[in-house]
Structure formats: C-alpha cells, structure tokens
Amino acid sequence: MPEVNFDWVKGQMQEAKVKVGVGTAILKLLETWNEMKLSNNQVKETVELFTKLAVNHSILPEKPDEIWADAQPGAILVGDEVRVKSDAYDGDTGVIHNGRRGKVVGVRYGDIIFKSNDGKMPVLDGTHYTPYQLQKRVR
C-alpha cells in the first residue's frame, strides 16, 4: 500500500473546503491508516467495510440460496419474509434495525408491521417500516 501523501491530502481538503472538524478526523484516521501494512485487495475491502460500519450499516453476507428484492408498496403481504435494508438507518437506530430479518405480521396505512425471527436481540415485535426500508425474499 502506498504511503499517504499528507501534503496532497491537505491540499485536496483545502480546495474542497472541508470543514475543520471533518478534516481533523480524516487526518487522524489517515495517520493510523499510514501505519497499516495491507495488500491492495485488503485496502479495498477495509475501506468498503469501514465505510459501512462507521455509519452502522449492516455487512451481513448474502446466503447463496436466497434472492432478495427491494420491497414495493402494495406487493408485501402478511406472512412474507422480509429484511430491513442494510443501510435503512444511520447511527444508533441502524445498530438495532439494519439487516434484521423477520415476517410481516400486518400491513396498515402503508406501513409494514414486522416481527423479527433472526434470533438477535432486541426482538422486534410490531415494529413499523415503510416498504422502502425493506427487502422481500423472493426465493
């Protein structure tokens, strides 16, 4: 992995008018990053996973025998197996909801009412989602 060129980074951030707090955080992260000895493949994977985990998005692997599609309003029925999109929420809410699996237990006024069945805590029972936050298992 090439070393970080801090002069170049600072110039880029200055031209992009990056806010001071954000710039300081980036420089601290890059200082640690500069100490890592990673292959090019590891660099790509690390950046991809860090980007998701830093905002509490789920990184659960896909199961090869399952096919999921973005849920559509009107196309979700009671009993359907659904999961919350991996990036449906940011922050602490994402830790609780993103990537969770369950069954549709009701549909009311456009909301999909969900009960988790993935064995994770806390159990989500009666949680309301919009269809746009969900994926439906199609196989």
Image (tube, rainbow, N blue to C red):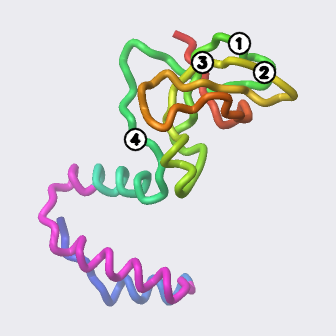
Q: Is residue 59 left or right of residue 109?
A: left
Q: Residues within 10 Å of mark 4 (few under 14, many from 20)?
A: some
The image position of residue 128, as x and y in percent, is 71, 34
The Cα atoms of the two marked residues, 3 and 4, are separated by 21 Å
The Cα atoms of the two marked residues, 3 and 1, are separated by 8 Å
Residue at the disc numbered 2: 107
Q: Residues within 10 Å of mark 2 (few under 14, many from 20)?
A: some
The Cα atoms of the two marked residues, 1 and 2, are separated by 7 Å
The image position of residue 115, as x and y in percent, is 60, 24
Foreground label between 2 and 4: 2
Residue type, mark 2 in image: Val
Identify which residue is drawn at 49% across, 85% down.
21
Mark closer to the chain start, 3 or 4: 4
The Cα atoms of the two marked residues, 4 and 1, are separated by 27 Å
Residue at the disc numbered 4: 59
Residue type, mark 3 in image: Lys
The image position of residue 14, as x and y in percent, is 49, 89
